[in-house]
Amino acid sequence: MKEITEPEMLHRAAAYCSAAERCIQDVQKKIDAAGLPPDASERIIARLLKERFIDESRYTRFFVNDKLRFNKWGRVKIGYELYKKNIPSPIREESLAAIDEGEYCSILLDLLKSKKKSTKGKDERDLFNKLLRFAAGRGFESRITLNCLSQLFKGIDCEDYADDME
């Protein structure tokens, strides 16, 4: 197999970043897979950052938007995935704080409504707890989930039902 040169890898990495938003870790994996030495890798990443092919805050904004709207993930799960990609904490927090609260609750409520239709429970309390666990698995905060569930179950006292979860 032909050895890849640093300028060629820079060109490939720039094309990779042009196709979609990428974070430093994504590009680093591609460069490492090509077998370039670490100093060449650092130079390529620095050049891509300088020329704004890579922009972590831009990447994070798009990531948060996509995961919320298309994957229907909550803040907790999105934040964890960004943490795994080594996105700095201030950038993560800024992007997660930019989520529109009304849209966020609307997405969760729609998700819970559709899940309620397909979920069976022994009684209303069991169904409530299953939906609460479902929302937690999707990364939604308990406080917001309880508000949505109280709307869904028409004003029940959520604290009584949620006691089973502790």
Image (cartoon, rainbow, N blue to C red):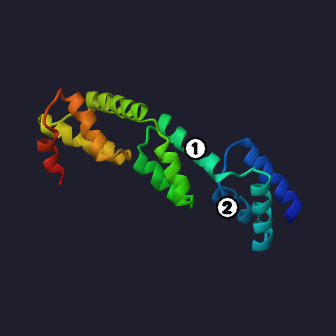
Q: Estimate how packed mark 2 is, as few (under 14), some (14 to 19) or many (20 or more) residues with alpha carbons within 10 Å.
A: few
Residue 100 visible in rendering:
yes
Q: Secondary structure at mark 2?
A: helix
Q: Quadrant of residue 50?
A: bottom right
Q: Estimate how packed mark 1 is, as few (under 14), some (14 to 19) or many (20 or more) residues with alpha carbons within 10 Å.
A: some
The kind of residue on which mark 1 rests is: Arg
Q: Is residue 76 left or right of residue 142?
A: right
Mark 2 vs mark 1, foreground winner is 1
**Residue that carries the numbered disc 2 in the rendered image:** 29
Q: Residue at x 88, y 60 (%)?
A: 7
Q: Is residue 166 left or right of residue 98?
A: left
Q: Position of residue 126 (x, y in %)?
A: 15, 40
Q: Is residue 130 left or right of residue 28?
A: left
Q: Quadrant of residue 118?
A: top left
- Discs 2, 1 touching: Cβ within 8 Å: no
Q: Residue at x 76, y 44 (%)?
A: 18
Q: Position of residue 28 (x, y in %)?
A: 69, 62
Earlier-in-chain disc, 2 versus 1: 2
The quarter in which the N terminus is drawn is bottom right
Q: Residue at x 24, y 34 (%)?
A: 149
- What numbered label is drawn on residue 30? none
Q: Position of residue 72 (x, y in %)?
A: 44, 37
Q: Looking at the picture, tell me which residue is in the foreground, 99 or 31.
A: 99
* C-alpha gap between disc 2 and disc 1: 21 Å
Residue 2 visible in rendering:
no
**Residue that carries the numbered disc 1 in the rendered image:** 61
The quarter in which the C terminus is drawn is bottom left
Q: Position of residue 142 (x, y in %)?
A: 28, 46
The kind of residue on which mark 2 rests is: Lys
Q: Residue at x 73, y 42 (%)?
A: 19
Q: Secondary structure at mark 1?
A: helix
